[in-house]
Image (cartoon, grey):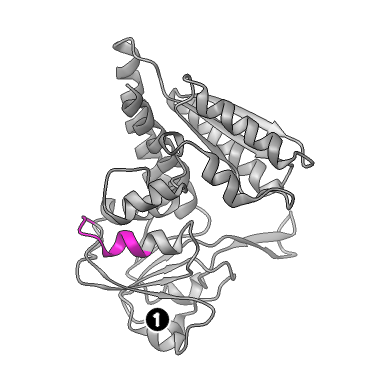
Amino acid sequence: MTILDGKKVSNDIKNEIAEHVTAMIDKGEKVPHLAAVLVGSDGASMTYVNAKVKACEKIGFKSTLIELPEYTTEDELLKTIDKLNNDTDIDGFIVQLPLPDQIDEQKVLMAIDPDKDVDGFHPTNVGRMALDLPTFLPATPYGIMELLERYQVETSGKNVVVMGRSHIVGRPMSILMSQKRKAGDATVTVVHSRSKNLKEITLGADIIVAAIGISEFLTGEMVKEDVVVIDVGITRVPDQTKKNGYRLAGDVHFESVSKKASYITPVPGGVGPMTIAMLLKNTLLARERHN
């Protein structure tokens, strides 16, 4: 069994980007500039955004963090987005999700300039991805594809089961895995809360991408020998043996599934670090496009 070490691979990618940035500076070119908009004080969102800012500093990017209060109106947020769209110094930006209830998430994502949408959520970029055209890929699926490529996991002709149909992970993952690409050419099945005979489907999978948001849902009895498992989930599970009173768990029951898996991602340290690395890669792409 091989651990797909997202922490190591993401550090490799960051080092590659840092070398690229150094070369840009030597040529007198402008370095990439990533902005992040955070509305409210959700703990998980703050941690994630701060990690992005630190990653930018580490590789030589410029970064801007715009923090808005919880009571920010939809109109105020849209005005902030408009300013970022028109700021020529900003190459790409993200609006951290989830947003407070008074703000229409879809309206916000639609307002972002597709050329600065380094999260890859705008319909223009999603459409280009579906048509296999150059675009910003959603960071988490992009990270998973990169992880599979760098570990040379064979995907061609394999049966892939994607658990979950979210616009952020499940749907784009199913599209990318079925395309003609290095980590692709697979036969893909998407399962969700209404799927029948779930265990029967997962037992036939060569590769499983678990992104349903239910901690430790996928167990050893649901997978076959030598399966490749990508765990996208991360949930705080109460654990009194831990100092902080909880442990982090994925959508996969690691102890039982890892006994059968040929490759598996850990939680934490698997998909999470890759998401940030690919966001940085998208920002570099945005800077090069603007050049």
Q: Residues within 10 Å of mark 1 (few under 14, many from 20)?
A: many
Image coordinates for residue 77, horizontal then vertical, percent: 66, 36
Q: Relative to residue 84, is residue 106 depicted above or below?
A: below
On the rendered structure, is 256 left or right of 17? right
Image coordinates for residue 188, horizontal then vertical, percent: 31, 72
Residue 51 visible (yes or no): yes
On the rendered structure, is 48 left or right of 162? right
The residue lying at 37 percent from left, 57 percent from top is 4
Q: Is residue 165 magenta?
A: no
The residue lying at 45 percent from left, 54 percent from top is 271
Image coordinates for residue 155, horizontal then vertical, percent: 24, 65
On the rendered structure, is 97 left or right of 59? right
Q: Which residue is mark 1?
A: 202
In the image, the segment drawn in magenta is 174-182
Quadrant where the image shows the C terminus: top left
- Tell me the amino acid under the disc marked 1: Thr
Residue 19 visible (yes or no): no
Image coordinates for residue 158, horizontal then vertical, percent: 24, 72
Nearer to the camera, 12 or 277: 277
Q: Relative to residue 19, is residue 238 depicted above or below?
A: below
* Residue 75, image quadrant: top right
Quadrant where the image shows the N terminus: bottom left
On the rendered structure, is 107 left or right of 10? right
Q: Is residue 181 magenta?
A: yes
> What secondary structure is found at the residue carrying circle 1?
helix
Q: Relative to residue 111, is residue 255 depicted above or below?
A: below
The residue lying at 54 percent from left, 78 percent from top is 193
Most distant residue in the right direction: 71
